[in-house]
C-alpha cells in the first residue's frame, strides 16, 4: 500500500477543484420548487372528515354509555336537594324579578 499522500492522484484532483460556493438565491429557488411541486395529501380530505365524524360519534357514544342512572332514592333526586339547590342558586329571586317588563326596567324602576 502506498503511504505517500503527496503523490496520490486523488489529492491532486482535489487540489485542482474550485471551492463550492452557494448562490445567495439558493434558498429562494429551493422554496419555489417546493411550492411548485404537486403535493398530494396522504389521506383525501373527505376521508379525514368522515374519520373525524366517526371519532366524535364513538366518543359521544362512550360518554353516554358510561353514565349510570341515579337510583330512585338517591340524594340527587330528592326533594330536599332540589329545594336546597334552588335556594343556593337564587332561583326564587329570579322568579320574583321576572314580573318586571322591559319597559319598566328601562324607566329606572
Image (cartoon, helix red, strand yellow):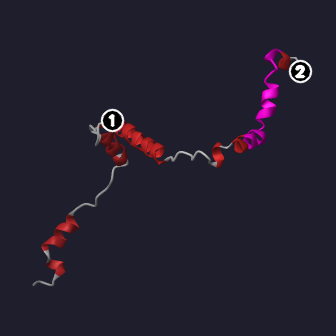
Q: Is residue 6 left or right of residue 79?
A: left
Q: Is residue 63 magenta?
A: no
Q: Name the foreground residue: 28 vs 103.
A: 103
Residue 27 is tagged as none
Q: Position of residue 8 (x, y in %)?
A: 14, 76
Element type where label 2 sits in the image: loop
Q: Is residue 100 magenta?
A: yes
Measured along the vertical axis of the image, is residue 17 above or below residue 31? below
Q: Position of residue 7 (x, y in %)?
A: 14, 78
Q: Position of residue 36 (x, y in %)?
A: 30, 37
Name the residue located 82 percent from the left edge and 20 percent from the top edge: 100
Circle 1 residues within 10 Å: few <14, some 14–19, many ≥20:
few
Point out the stretch of residues depicted in magenta. 83-103
Element type where label 1 sits in the image: helix
Name the residue located 15 percent from the left edge and 84 percent from the top edge: 3
In the rendered image, the quadrant that contains the N terminus is bottom left
Q: Is residue 58 left or right of residue 88?
A: left
Q: Earlier in the sequence, mark 2 or mark 1?
A: 1
Name the residue located 57 percent from the left edge and 46 percent from the top edge: 70
Q: Quadrant of residue 52?
A: top left
Question: Mark 1 = which residue?
Answer: 45
Q: Residue furthest front?
A: 73
Question: Mark 2 = which residue?
Answer: 108
Q: Position of residue 40 (x, y in %)?
A: 27, 39
Q: Name the foreground residue: 51 vs 86.
A: 86
Name the residue located 22 percent from the left edge and 62 percent from the top edge: 17
Amino acid at each position: 500500500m502506498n503511504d505517500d499522500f503527496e503523490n496520490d492522484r486523488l489529492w491532486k484532483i482535489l487540489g485542482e477543484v474550485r471551492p463550492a460556493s452557494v448562490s445567495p438565491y439558493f434558498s429562494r429557488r429551493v422554496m419555489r420548487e417546493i411550492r411548485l411541486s404537486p403535493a398530494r395529501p396522504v389521506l383525501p380530505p373527505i376521508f379525514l372528515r368522515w374519520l373525524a365524524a366517526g371519532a366524535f360519534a364513538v366518543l359521544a357514544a362512550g360518554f353516554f354509555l358510561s353514565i349510570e342512572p341515579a337510583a330512585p332514592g338517591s340524594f340527587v333526586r330528592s326533594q330536599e336537594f332540589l329545594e336546597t339547590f334552588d335556594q343556593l342558586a337564587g332561583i326564587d329571586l329570579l322568579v320574583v324579578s321576572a314580573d318586571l317588563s322591559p319597559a319598566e326596567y328601562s324607566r329606572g324602576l
